[in-house]
Amino acid sequence: MSWCSILVDLLIKNGVIITVNSKNEVISDGGVVIDADKIIDIGPMSKIQNYSFNNEIDAKGMVIIPGLINTHTHLAMTLFRGVADDVPGINWLPIIWSIEKNITAEHCYVGALLGCLEMITTGTTTFADQYWHMDRVVKAVNEAGMRANLAQGILELNEPDKGERELTESVAFAKKWNNSSNGRITCKLGPHSIYTCSPTLLQKTREAADEIDVGLHIHVAEAPNEPKMTKEKHGETSIEHLHNLGILKDDVLAAHCVFVNKADMKIMKQTNTSVAHCPTAMMKYGNEVAPIPELLEKEVMVGIGTDGCGSNNNLDMIEEMRTAAFLHKQNKREGTVLPAQQIIRMATILGAKSLGLENEIGSLEVGKKADIIMLDFKKPHLTPFHNCPSHIVYSAFGSDVDTVIIDGNVVMKNGQIITLDESKVLTLAQEAFEELLEIGGYSLSYEKNPKPGFKTNLTVKSFQTFLKLQQKLKGG
Amino acid sequence: MSWCSILVDLLIKNGVIITVNSKNEVISDGGVVIDADKIIDIGPMSKIQNYSFNNEIDAKGMVIIPGLINTHTHLAMTLFRGVADDVPGINWLPIIWSIEKNITAEHCYVGALLGCLEMITTGTTTFADQYWHMDRVVKAVNEAGMRANLAQGILELNEPDKGERELTESVAFAKKWNNSSNGRITCKLGPHSIYTCSPTLLQKTREAADEIDVGLHIHVAEAPNEPKMTKEKHGETSIEHLHNLGILKDDVLAAHCVFVNKADMKIMKQTNTSVAHCPTAMMKYGNEVAPIPELLEKEVMVGIGTDGCGSNNNLDMIEEMRTAAFLHKQNKREGTVLPAQQIIRMATILGAKSLGLENEIGSLEVGKKADIIMLDFKKPHLTPFHNCPSHIVYSAFGSDVDTVIIDGNVVMKNGQIITLDESKVLTLAQEAFEELLEIGGYSLSYEKNPKPGFKTNLTVKSFQTFLKLQQKLKGG
């Protein structure tokens, strides 16, 4: 420290930095200088100025990348991990709902704490969530020190009053929390989907969103029978339907988009609609493959999401990146599809763009928020040390994340989370889960899905029957 | 310890045990009693006899399963991790060979050490390897204390003398090492494939195998152009070709079997040919999907393999299990395909059967060898604690493996490997890799594949051209 040096909060030194800047630069022996919540310098160690610093992290043997951005999840659903596996896709939601109908705000808080814990420890610094009891998710996010884009869900289910009520709640939530916590929390409105919200409600949601200047987070063209149902009901594709209602804009985050055709893609590009691609959940339920390479080719913004733990079953973005790469290489019968560097961009800067946060996060550049993760590469499966982007996508584990910085704060160091009491969160989550089972009349099993009562042999043939069943489950 | 109790080497207590026995029993609060290399008692803690023990492991919060069995890899290729990613499938082998041609026995030893380290730390206790310099792999396996089925590779490449020479070496290797190290090491002969070995050589290999009573480990119907090439050259499918040559028996381990039709499957069932399914490597190169659900339906034995690190890029069997489940659910558009319990069977008991070791390993039962792993479930991504098979397949990381026992010996405890010096192995592997790059005239890069010289734009149109290129690369 020389007498003329600038005092800063934190220096990270001696790491390999994957910047994810517009040139995709990788710095082989680099440093990052952080003051307050921002990156104020970054580059090769030889070019980093002589700063004084309050704290220092030696990143030798580590790889430094932007914090991962999970663009679609339902955080509190961590409590449903493992309850509806290996079942026919159409039965998944009824099974989940048979437990979910009893969920309280407190359960959601605990589930969100578990989710934040899991995300931080596996390198996710920002996530987009659409669920209920979101006030309690805010509380968990603030305790964990994460960055999040939160949307209170809106379900109408052929009950206009219910739809209106949930829209009002979603708007109130967004007004209350958007741009809170030093900007760490932003909001959207959360209309669930076009098969659970009427055209009228969707339009009202759009108007309300414009009024309070937030976007929309909605499931689009996800279920195998959605295309047929939408065509029959509205004479349009899901994307056309939303477009013709005037819903689509650059603030729309459309989860899944499995069933979109070329004309839909053109609309998505025109309207700057973003996509949250969740490959694992779609594979696990035997769904079709979303046309992600085509969407990227058309310059539609595509981020990566894990979806909720009821369907994934974890929140590990490293696994999600790998699965995305493998799935599309296999689907296109071409090993060059979605190379590692591209996948990392999807999980960082494209995710940031999908959330309208590209000026804040998504790459390691001067002026951006200090949302940074460090992976410990001194591991058998990451040796020999070279080709770091590829090792991250094709070989790393979520558990290789050693250090996590969000908004300039070190929230995890040496693999230990600082902001949450890990052991306490695990205990609370176990208790909440067992309580939900008890209320629902299910018993705990180490062998397979809780039983009895899990109707895994339900044969729900159509969405009409499905919606009726759903009503029934919600009612009883 | 009462005065009348039996003295044993090791008691594991208080864990959830996934036995993978014929009833697929899961014991919620169980113990395993080990003496010398064998399991001598297993059951609920309440039914475990009162033993005295030299050592004890408390498995509270852990899940105990049979050691995972990786049925197809090329162990020393850990040194090629990350050198040929995101390239057209047809270019992969030429790229690998451009480095591999310089590999020495010492490199293979170091690569095998790295492989053993990676496998043990991620829960694999047994693997099947087909590669070269296998004497040095034996040395690594013995130092690591693993169980392995090893085959010295046989490549003919239209040079009958070379083929004869390699057959002789493969036979000498198998004779020397089969059933060595308390039976931990068994051997097969390793004819590479039908496109690199002539019918004559394959038949000689079969005769030699019968003479010394070992099986064969061979790549079958893997490459997209193998079916056409085999049809043109031999008028048969790959399976028919091998069957008509009299090669197929219950001691044949056929890696991949991507391109097998119904008639082939019938032959495979009749001959009790086993399959090593390697989903990750096949997806990564954009290959077709092997018909695994169909093969299992026909009761063909299918184990799971990672393939080598040049193509996977890791040796993590937990990831491989998950990928197998997801791939086939997606491919069949049906979430019920290959449920978690079935996947675990494939990675344990079916793997054991594929290697002819079902009386020794693959399940936790009295009389079997003590090849056991324990996963620490006190983790965010494994909470809530229930449905253990599902959590392992759909949510666990390789790094959740806490303790590994092979042949009754504790080779890893509390996440720390005991038999190898981890830090030393990582250093040796890095040095070996950099030496191979230097010999080949490549430079180290943290950004992407080593360059220059990686001809990722090669357009090898046919196997004929491919074989010529391969000869050229081997030559210079």
Image (cartoon, coloured by chain):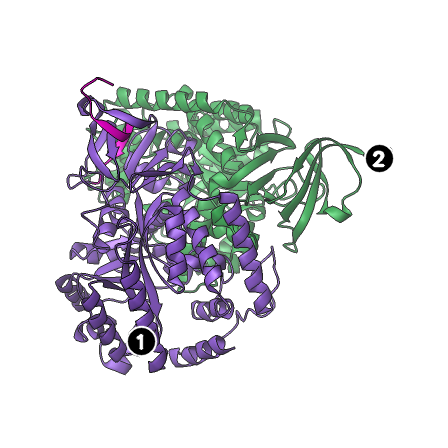
Chain colours: A green, B purple
Q: Nearer the viewer, residue A34 or A278?
A: A34
Q: Give residue A208's mark.
A: none
x 38%, y 27%: residue? A161
Q: Quadrant of the C terminus of chain A?
A: top left
Expressed as whole percent of the image width and height from the top left, the position of residue B124 reads 35, 46
Q: Give the CA distance from mark 1 to mark 2.
A: 69 Å
Secondary structure at badge 2 equals: loop
Expressed as whole percent of the image width and height from the top left, the position of residue B42 reads 20, 31
Q: Is residue A89 left or right of residue A52?
A: left
Which residue is under mark 2? Answer: A2
Q: Amino acid at mark 1?
A: Cys
- Give the chain letter at badge 2: A
Expressed as whole percent of the image width and height from the top left, the position of residue B92 reads 45, 67
Q: Quadrant of residue B52?
A: top left
User: In this rendering, is residue A260 above or below A74?
Assistant: below
Q: Is residue B119 left or right of residue B369?
A: right
User: In this rendering, is residue A360 above or below A167?
Assistant: below
Which residue is under mark 1? Answer: B197
**Residue that extends furthest to the left in the rendered view of this protein:** B270
Please say whether residue B9 is one of the residues in the magenta stretch: yes
Please say whether residue B267 is one of the residues in the magenta stretch: no
Q: Is residue A46 visible?
A: yes
Magenta-colored segment: predominant secondary structure: strand
Expressed as whole percent of the image width and height from the top left, the position of residue A395 reads 47, 50
Magenta segment boundaries in residue numbering: B1-20
User: In this rendering, is residue A411 above or below A273?
Assistant: above
Q: Is residue A224 visible?
A: no
Q: Quadrant of residue A473?
A: top left
Q: Amino acid at mark 2?
A: Ser
- Give the chain letter at badge 1: B
